[in-house]
Amino acid sequence: MNDNELLESFKNGDADSMGLLVEKYRSSLYTFILSYTKSEENASDIFQEIFLKLVEKPEVFKGGNFKGWLFTVARNKCMDLFRSNSGRIMSIDEEIEEGLTLESVLASDEPTPLERMLTEAENDKLYEVFSHLSPEQREVILLKDEFGFKEIAEMLNTPIGTVLARANRGYKKMKEHLEKNYEN
């Protein structure tokens, strides 16, 4: 059964269908949320909030691409969390106490799908390079791990040309940084 059929089955009283949807997206959606929040607690809360709302009111999903809808809702919840954080988003390497950065406090052991494909040394390079991208470029590159450019454009409500440009500039910036700083 596809996602829409599972949701329809849940609406018709099959509770196991929702469990299948939760399991299907547990890893990819949680990892996506965690990449935004950098907090396991916030990522778990947002993940649970999304599915709880879906359980309570399955009609919130109006049809179409369930996976795209799910990741869009997750992204919006992450943005709401950032906005509620006194309207200020801290830099990941900003010092919050003497010798402590936000990154060191919120570091997660949960690997992203992209990380699973790379060696440990490459991960260190990737994190360092990734930190030089704009938030918009990081967002598109993170979403590209799960979606096509057309879906990303729809999710971000952004013209596909802008999405392609962000990805292109992001990948180019990453490549240049790697070549400059990690010549073999």
Image (tube, rainbow, N blue to C red):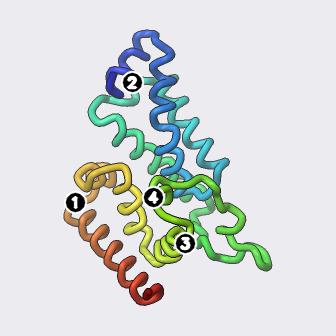
Image marks 3 and 2: residues in contact by CB distance under 8 Å: no
Residue 44 locus on image (x, y percent): 61, 43
> Looking at the picture, which amino acid does disc 3 mark?
Ala
- Which residue lies under the disc numbered 4? 117
Q: CA distance from mark 1 to mark 2?
A: 28 Å
Q: Are marks 1 and 4 in contact (CB under 8 Å)?
A: no
Type of amino acid under label 1: Pro
Q: How many marks?
A: 4
Q: Helix, strand or loop at disc 4? A: loop
Disc number lying in front (4 or 2): 4
Query: Is disc 1 in contact with disc 2, using a CB cutoff of under 8 Å?
Result: no
Question: Mark 2 and mark 4 in contact (Cβ < 8 Å)?
Answer: no
Front-most of 59 and 106? 106
Q: Nearer the viewer, residue 85 or 172?
A: 172
Residue placed under numbered mark 2 in the picture: 59
The crowding category of the residue bearing disc 2, from other C-alpha atoms within 10 Å (few below 14, some 14 to 19, many at least 20), is few
The structure residue drawn at horizontal position 69% and vertical position 68%, both measured from the top left corner, is 104
Quote the CA–CA distance across marks 3 and 2: 45 Å
The residue under label 1 is: 159
The residue labelled by disc 3 is 121
Q: Position of residue 61 (x, y in %)?
A: 37, 30
Q: Which residue lies at the image location 52% right of the left edge and 38% below the top edge? A: 26
Q: CA distance from mark 4 to mark 2?
A: 37 Å
The label on residue 75 is none
